[in-house]
Image: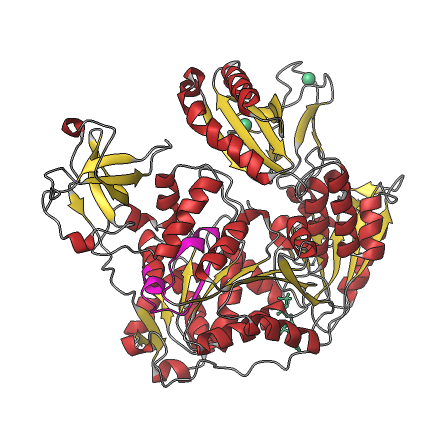
């Protein structure tokens, strides 16, 4: 029935994933079951010359477009919406709050396979398990086939079946070895009853730890509020047992027959947490992150939607996964910048999670050792409730932080003699050392000693980074690469010298200074191969590594029990950024890296090399801790009327043409002046801190207001007008609400 009783055509108003703000009207399909027509269902519609997937927003009787011009919906893909009414409301909210086209927001909520219109009948993944023989065999007997041996050991350590997705997440090249082990009758396809815990089975596999009183208080607070909305900030120093708290709360949620969504900042952290969860819980756990295939992600999404899985572990993009019986949302390392999407639909997974919790009427638990200033501010405002774990759990003690003044000290590739001596003492006790340097490559600059020529990227306002291992010069901003040159192209005679430090360079000097010791470098270059990071982490935990050197990759969550000395080689480079977020990020980084020291029985030390030993950020952090730092930093933000004491939105524009972005933003600024009632400051346009990147000229315009509603009211008026500006067609532009990175 396509026609209404009065003979009019019924019109489907739909959202389509294209970067425009409006919705689109279509005629109802020739044939349909009206009971199926609910907001949120997926449709296939003709769009330009192609077909696109659309999401039904509403059915209306009137369109502003003449009926004769409307095209017809071709196909209805879903019998009922895959998202609940509340989750649909969440998407509408997010589209309004981030001023982002609804179609793109919808699209972000669905896994790629479903976005492309694939059917929702997705075959369950295969799972594998040990046979009786596989359980009994000593893995050493497979030592001639190391790949099979390692797969077998993985299964033996788990003691339960593993899905294709879990195996892929662990090691991309599992298939051949698994097949060989099946042929040898050490592995078998797991019975499907293994998938998911049966009702009679208990939820818990291992007994929980005996919690300390602070942990217990946190658990009780959250458990008491299950079934209603509330935001909890679990502030616990690294190693204070936050994960244990999560697990005990999750247990209660599972016992209520509800599901839990757990979000993590990094893909690399999922395997460890997954492992701990699997050791604790017998229920089925779904995993979702960008390294999985489209099919695997769709599968995880649908099993949660149908209530076939109880726990979802995922990264930012998993936030919108529908839950049949939602019980709790946990965001671990809530301060982490990767919870903010930095392109396209630029949402903050933390902030949207809070709104989702409110709509679903369930608690949201945010955990961190170094909470974001916004979150602490929300505690001060009584919007979030603080749960505090001030001490390390078990017998571990907090590491001792110390500044090492390197002014006028002899340095060898970034290492002071005092630090080298400390490293030797640590290694002599058979303990591990971790060195942190947040710059990969050999050196960030190649300069001519004769004429001062510097190797610059042709497409960016940036220097090329030397990568000796590969013999290349590489731009870290656009990826451009060229052969490492030997002679200065400007004066032809001068000697080219590397300037500054990168991890590759430090690795080389470590190999000389600590001959015979095993050194592992962990950065984006050394861990590119899939499974490489996991292998390194395994080596480190087995104790076969003496010195670990790495970038921010090290700062996150990893547990290195035998590391007792941590050194931050160049803390000063973080002290002079122009972004007002920089001190917060630096303090978080220092505390997180420090948290890698002395996590087990042995006490840990942290040495920071600095030429700024009196710098207030460093001294506050060391003498009084992160919380005092945060209080000071919040006071400074307040004085300067910066977020969270004001609200910002950043409009970015770029183009090949040097002038166009500026002209466009000038036009926007003019419009904004016209419509702003004086409450919103319009700052700029100014060139972006990196004014040219990948050949594009970049400008930005900042809106700032002391009142959030004022800012959004202005943006509501502006966005449709901006779209229509004639310059808008000649630039790429995007709006970033609550930007965390002003670059
Ligand atoms: P976080 O997540 O805060 O870094 P974890 O939950 O990983 O901390 O705990 C750190 C270590 O302390 C782990 O090895 C964990 O098993 C142990 N632990 C946690 N809670 C307790 C407890 N109540 N008693 C003894 N050990 C504990
Ligand atoms: Zn030269
Ligand atoms: Zn470049």
In this picture, is 74 found above or below 475?
below
Q: At which x and y percent is residue 19? A: 37, 32
Residue 694 in view here: no
Residue 401: x %, y % from top left: 81, 57
The x and y percentages for residue 314 are 46, 58
Percent x, y of residue 128? 33, 72
Compared across the picture, whether 581 is left or right of 69 comes to right
Picture residue at 47% right of the left edge, 18% below the top: 656
Instruction: Please state which of residues 370 and 428 is positioned toward the viewer in this rendering.
Output: 370
Relative vertical location of residue 199 with respect to residue 632 in this rendering, above or below: below
Q: Residue at x 69, y 66 (%)?
A: 388
Where does the C terminus fall, quadrant-wise?
Answer: top right
The front one of 741 and 291 is: 741
The quarter of the image that holds ligand 1 is bottom right
Q: Can residue 350 be seen at all in this image of the molecule?
A: yes
Q: Is residue 684 above or below residue 148?
A: above
Residue 319 magenta-highlighted: yes
Q: Nearer the viewer, residue 137 or 275?
A: 275
Residue 476 picture quarter: top right
Q: Is residue 335 left or right of residue 306?
A: right
Residue projecting furthest to the front: 6
Which colour style is shown?
secondary structure
Q: Residue at x 33, y 52 (%)?
A: 294
Depth order, front residue of 442/440: 440
Q: How many marks?
A: 0
Highlighted range, magenta: 302-324
**Magenta residue check for 519:** no
Position of 152 compared to 245: left or right?
Answer: left
């Amino acid at each position: 029935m396509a026609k209404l009783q009065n003979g009019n055509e019924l019109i489907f108003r739909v959202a389509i994933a294209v970067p425009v703000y409006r919705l689109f009207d279509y005629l109802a399909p020739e044939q349909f079951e009206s009971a199926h027509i609910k907001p949120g269902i997926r449709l296939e519609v003709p769009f330009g010359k192609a077909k696109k997937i659309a999401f039904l927003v509403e059915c209306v009787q009137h369109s502003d477009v003449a009926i004769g011009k409307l095209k017809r919906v071709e196909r209805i893909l879903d019998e009922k919406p895959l998202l609940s009414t509340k989750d649909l409301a969440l998407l509408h909210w997010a589209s309004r709050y981030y001023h982002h086209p609804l179609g793109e927001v919808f699209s972000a909520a669905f896994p790629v396979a479903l976005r492309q219109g694939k059917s929702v009948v997705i075959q369950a993944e295969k799972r594998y398990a040990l046979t009786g023989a596989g359980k009994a065999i000593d893995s050493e007997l497979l030592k001639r086939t190391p790949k099979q041996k390692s797969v077998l050991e993985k299964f033996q350590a788990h003691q339960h079946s593993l899905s294709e997705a879990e195996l892929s997440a662990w090691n991309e090249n599992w298939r051949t070895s698994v097949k060989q082990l099946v042929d040898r009758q050490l592995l078998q396809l797991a019975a499907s009853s293994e998938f998911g815990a049966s009702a009679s089975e208990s939820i818990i596999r291992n007994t929980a730890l005996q919690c300390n009183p602070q942990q217990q208080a946190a658990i009780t607070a959250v458990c008491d509020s299950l079934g209603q909305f509330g935001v909890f900030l679990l502030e616990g120093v690294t190693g204070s047992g936050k994960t244990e708290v999560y697990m005990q709360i999750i247990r209660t949620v599972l016992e209520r027959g509800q599901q839990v969504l757990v979000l993590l900042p990094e893909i690399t952290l999922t395997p460890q947490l997954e492992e701990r969860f699997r050791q604790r819980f017998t229920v089925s756990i779904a995993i979702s992150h960008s390294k999985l295939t489209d099919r695997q992600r769709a599968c995880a999404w649908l099993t949660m939607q149908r209530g076939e899985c109880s726990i979802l572990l995922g990264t930012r993009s998993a936030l919108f996964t529908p839950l049949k019986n939602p019980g709790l949302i946990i965001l671990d390392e809530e301060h982490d910048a990767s919870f903010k999407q930095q392109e396209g639909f630029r949402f903050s997974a933390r902030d949207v999670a809070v709104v989702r919790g409110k709509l679903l009427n369930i608690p949201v638990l945010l955990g961190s050792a170094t909470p974001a200033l916004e979150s602490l501010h929300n505690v001060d405002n009584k919007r979030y409730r603080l749960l505090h774990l001030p001490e390390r759990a078990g017998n571990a003690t907090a590491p001792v932080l110390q500044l090492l003044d390197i002014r006028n000290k002899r340095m060898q590739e970034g290492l002071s003699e005092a630090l080298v001596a400390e490293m030797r003492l640590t290694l002599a006790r058979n303990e591990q050392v971790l060195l942190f340097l947040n710059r990969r490559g050999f050196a960030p600059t190649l300069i001519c000693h004769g004429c001062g020529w510097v190797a610059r990227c042709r497409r960016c306002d940036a220097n090329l980074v030397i990568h000796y291992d590969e013999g290349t010069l590489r731009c870290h901003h656009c990826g451009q690469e060229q052969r490492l040159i030997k002679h200065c192209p400007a004066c032809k005679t001068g000697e080219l010298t590397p300037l500054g430090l990168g991890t590759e360079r430090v690795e080389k000097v470590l190999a000389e200074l600590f001959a015979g010791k095993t050194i592992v470098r962990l950065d984006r270059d050394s861990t590119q191969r899939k499974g490489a990071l996991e292998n390194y982490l395994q080596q480190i935990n087995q104790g076969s590594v003496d010195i670990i050197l790495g970038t921010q990759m090290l700062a996150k969550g990893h547990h290195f029990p035998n590391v007792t000395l941590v050194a931050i080689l160049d803390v000063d480079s973080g002290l002079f950024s122009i972004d007002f977020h920089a001190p917060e990020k630096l303090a978080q980084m220092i505390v997180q890296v420090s948290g890698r020291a002395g996590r087990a029985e042995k006490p840990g030390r942290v040495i920071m090399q600095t030429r700024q030993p009196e710098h207030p950020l460093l001294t506050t952090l060391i003498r009084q801790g992160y919380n005092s730092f945060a209080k000071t930093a919040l006071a400074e933000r307040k004085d300067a009327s910066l977020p969270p004491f004001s609200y910002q939105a950043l409009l970015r524009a770029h183009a090949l043409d040097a002038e166009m972005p500026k002209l466009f933003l000038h036009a926007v600024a003019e419009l904004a002046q016209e419509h702003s009632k004086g409450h919103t400051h319009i700052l700029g346009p100014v060139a972006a801190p990196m004014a040219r990147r990948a050949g594009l000229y970049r400008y930005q315009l900042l809106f700032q207001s002391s009142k959030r509603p004022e800012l959004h009211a202005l943006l509501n008026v502006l966005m449709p007008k901006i779209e229509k500006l004639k310059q808008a067609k000649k630039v790429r532009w995007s709006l970033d609400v609550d930007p965390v990175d002003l670059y």
